[in-house]
Image (cartoon, coloured by chain):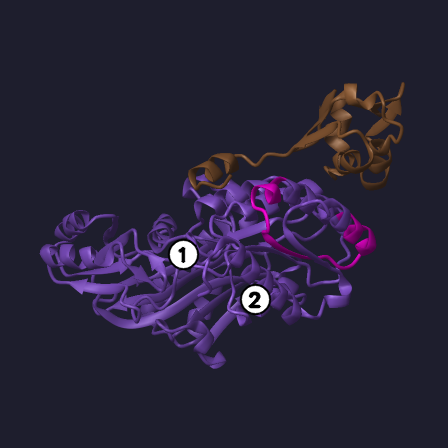
Amino acid sequence: MHFEERTIKVIIDEEKCLGCKTHVCAQGCKTYDRSLLVIRDGKPALSGDAEYAKRVGTECLACEYECWFRGNKAITIEAPTPGLEAYRKKYGIP
Amino acid sequence: MARLFEYQGKELLKKAKVPIPRGEVAATPQEAAKIAEKIGKPVVIKAQIWAGGRGKAGGIKFAENPAEAQAVAGNLLGVEIKKLKVEKVLVEEKLNIANEYYVGVIIDPSMGVRSPVVMFSTEGGMDIETVPPEKIAQMKVDVLRGFRVYDALNLAANLKVPTPSLPVIGQAIMGLYQTFKDYNCRTAEINPLVVTKDGKVIAGDCRIAIDDSSVYRHPEFGIEVARESPTPPTELDKIAWWIEEGDLRGTAYIAQMVPEIKGLNFVGYHGLGGGGAILGVDALNREGLKIADYADTSGNPTAAKVYRAAKVIFSQPGIEAYFLGGFIVANQEQWHHAHGVVKALREELPKRPGFPCVLMLCGNREKEALEILREGTADLPGRIEIYGSEKVYETEFLAKRVKALILEYRKDRGIKEE
């Protein structure tokens, strides 16, 4: 699944979530954001619709962090800055 | 405040019926010669840079004829004056000055005022801050009542401007106020407002800055970064501006200090809290280090915003360290900073093993923030040191740590110390 907040995209590889016992993404979301993520049928799911996530999400990045360290590394957050990739390429920054 | 160049400001004054000298802007010596030819009399050639004191710095020259104008413009274009590159010059008729006045409109934000203030002085051509108060007439404008022609006349009359000049000077003051209002300025100045020997009143020079929050209303100026700056924005400044342009959740101020890093000792600087962050810069400077950029993420920005700021800082070629300088016991929830910084470091450090990072976060949620920083960076290949409020006043210690880690990093890479 994936969903967007105002300027970021959260991508969750649900295959990896299957064996997850900690469900730290939802806990992190509750602590640092606004409980956009909840656990439904053993997997992360949105508590509201996509528009709701976009409107109220605080882009805290906590679900990705928690999943790295206590989950199954199933979450990737994309937060690009337009033009930065090309700038780095131009100046040889890897 | 987003500044305009003199030639842009004068165009606005012209629209407001304030007389300006005959002239045009030129980007090449040949264009300067053509303009001088069109004017058909001695000209003044003025470097278009965002700096005061151009005359003393060699940025204002005179020419008697088009050939001379071409030579003078050739000498000015492309050179650096006050560390600013001259890309355009304004070629104008030379004025026969009899008298010089000052007119300015500023916003006084103090609690007792909070309104525009119109100022007039008979001491034109000087820095207004150096003029004694008795030679400045001023009026706080009630914006509901407005500023009227007789207010302008009263200001000039209070300082005993000769009666024949009063109407034209009054009109120039009105024109400046109108410009200030129409273009949402923070400051607008004509200095000097010249009275020529044949009795004409002309705006000799002007300085106009648009309020940052109003820049979007004036796309005609082509202002790419709505922020006060002594220099035009760099390529990276423009990219970084996107982060905060439309996202008002906290700030992500980023300004490159040098467009291109040459040599050693440059640090990617990520400060928190404007004044506190400057303490860190001072400490780094005392250690012989320089900041490649000045960044400030404050006001409880989102973690995504902090992450992007850190990524921009890491995108500067030639930096030798990253310094998160939270020299402030902040009210903002610092765990968002921790999450943002950790995400950036986890992307950046594997690509530059041993890279020095000194991280300090203090204030609200400090304990949790430091835990996130420690856990999130424990497996990374950088030289990472993490501090909290126990070191908030110890800028010198932290700058020394940055320096020490840089020296180790240089050793790793076989780079000799400077």
Disc 2 sits on a residue from what chain? B
Circle nearer the N terminus (2, 1): 1
Decide if residue A89 is on the left or right side of residue B252. Answer: left
- Can residue B287 be found in the magenta stretch? no
Looking at the picture, tell me which residue is in the foreground, B209 or B316: B316
Q: Colour of chain B?
A: purple
Q: Is residue B340 left or right of residue B182?
A: right
Badge 2 crowding class, 10 Å Cα cut-off, few under 14, some 14 to 19, many 20 or more, is: many
Q: Amino acid at mark 2?
A: Leu
Q: Tell me where residue B167 appears, x and y as whole percent.
A: 36, 63
Label 2 sits on a secondary structure element that is helix
Q: Residue at x 55, y 47 (%)?
A: B314
Q: Position of residue B290 (x, y in %)?
A: 50, 63
The subunit carrying tag 1 is B
Regarding residue B126, the answer to whether it shows in the image is: yes
Identity of the amino acid at label 1?
Lys
Q: Is residue B249 visible?
A: no
Q: Residue at x 74, y 39 (%)?
A: A60
Write down the residue under mark 2.
B284
Read off the residue under disc 1: B262
Q: What segment carries the magenta color?
A: B347-372
Vertical relation: B158 (above or below) B276: below
Secondary structure under badge 1?
loop
Q: Nearer the viewer, residue A90 or B229?
A: A90
Residue sitting nearer the eye, B360 or B131: B360
User: Could you classify mark 1 by the number of other residues whose Cα lies within 10 Å: few (under 14), some (14-19), or many (20 or more)?
Assistant: few
Q: Which chain is brown?
A: A
Rounded to the nearest whole Å, what is the CA distance between mark 2 and mark 1?
Answer: 18 Å
Q: Nearer the viewer, residue B96 or B36?
A: B36
Quarter that holds the C terminus of chain B: bottom left
In x, y percent, where is residue B353? Answer: 59, 47
